[in-house]
Image: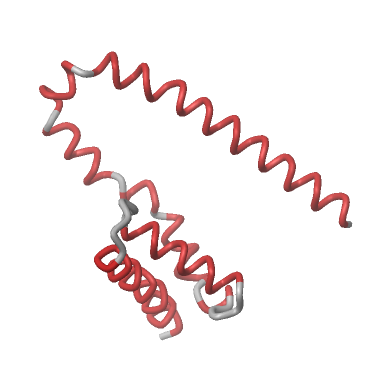
Amino acid sequence: MKLIFEFARIAAFCFAGEVCHLVLPLPIPASVYGLMLLLAALRFGGVKLEQVRTAALFLTGIFPLLFVPAAAGVMDLWADLQAMLVPVLLALIPITILVMTVSGCVTQRLAERKEKKQ
């Protein structure tokens, strides 16, 4: 029963993200609004981590499986994508390297800051 309530809390933030997407005239996906709202609620005490932890761990555990429909959709459009493959790869490879580098640097800084506090 606890797990159902945890999923319901997460779903409520997803729904709130959908509402924000409809109301606000910004080109931000509804899922991003929902994640920002959940992060704010966790940060400022509206929701305690224990109230969503189990469901969140389950969802992150099956996260790769959630990409299967998107990958299947790309395969349906392979003929169209094949013509743009080189420009897409030229854009994706440096951006991926940049994101990995920035993520690694931020993670190292946060780990160093945590070590200094201890």
Look at the picture and state if 13 lies above or below 28.
below
Colour logic:
secondary structure
Q: Residue drawn at (39%, 65%), measured in percent from left and top? A: 34
Judge from the rendering whether residue 78 lies leftward or rightward of residue 56; answer left or right: left
- Comparing 19 with 39, the one in front is 19
Count of labels in the image: 0
Toward the bottom, the furthest residue is: 1
Judge from the rendering whether residue 79 lies leftward or rightward of residue 55; answer left or right: left
- Comparing 47 with 1, the one in front is 47
Residue 25 in the image: x percent, y percent? 28, 59
Q: Residue drawn at (89%, 57%), measured in percent from left and top? A: 118
Look at the picture and state if 51 lies above or below 68.
below
Q: Quadrant of residue 85?
A: top left
- Comparing 93 with 26, the one in front is 26
Residue 69 in the image: x percent, y percent? 22, 46
Judge from the rendering whether residue 69 lies leftward or rightward of residue 117; answer left or right: left
Residue 6 in the image: x percent, y percent? 44, 77
Residue 28 in the image: x percent, y percent? 34, 53
Quarter of the image for the N terminus: give it.
bottom left
Q: Residue drawn at (31%, 64%), measured in percent from left and top? A: 24
Judge from the rendering whether residue 83 lies leftward or rightward of residue 38; answer left or right: left
